[in-house]
Amino acid sequence: MTEPIENRIHEVVNSIQPTPKDQDRNVTFKDLGWDSLDLVEMVNELEEEFDISITEKEAEGLLTLQHVHDIVAAKAK
């Protein structure tokens, strides 16, 4: 059985910048202290981990952890 998407997303996010697993998903990456390079790295790792493609426009819309969960869940089916 594959690991749940939520756990895999957390592993990717946590590998870039330590983030509590129970972190509020509506907190912005800016509030977490992320910069644009962190976001680019996250998108690249998510694409690799889930074998998906995230467009530049979609990546620009990834402002919160919830946005990440939504786009990955929609594309990883």
Image: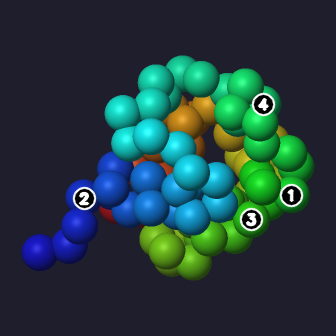
Figure label count: 4
- Where 68 sits versus 63, above or below? below
Q: Residue at horizontal 55%, vertical 36%?
A: 65
Q: Are marks 2 and 3 in contact (CB under 8 Å)?
A: no
**Residue 62: percent from the left, percent from the top?**
69, 39
Amino acid type indicated by mark 3:
Glu
- Residue at (56%, 51%) from the top-left corner? 18
Q: 17 and 29: which one is in front? A: 17
Residue 76: image quadrant is: bottom left
Residue matched to label 4: 30
**Quarter location, residue 3:** bottom left
Name the N-terminal-most of marks 1 and 2.
2
CA gap, disc 4 to disc 1?
12 Å
Q: Which mark is residue 37?
A: 1
Measure how far apart labels 1 and 3 are at the Cα level: 6 Å
- The disc labelled 1 sits on which kind of residue? Leu
Q: CA distance from mark 1 to mark 2?
A: 26 Å
Counting residues from the start of the chain, the first of labels 2 and 3 encountered is: 2
Q: Secondary structure at mark 2?
A: loop
Q: Which residue is mark 3?
A: 41
Instruction: Indicate whether 64 appears above or below 15.
Output: above
Rounded to the nearest angstrom, the CA distance separating label 4 from label 2 is 26 Å
Q: Which residue is mark 2?
A: 4
Q: Amino acid at mark 4?
A: Lys
Cβ–Cβ under 8 Å for marks 4 and 1: no
- What is the x, y in percent for residue 73? 40, 50
User: Depth-wise, is mark 1 or mark 2 nearer the camera?
Assistant: 1
- Viewer-closest of 56 and 29: 29
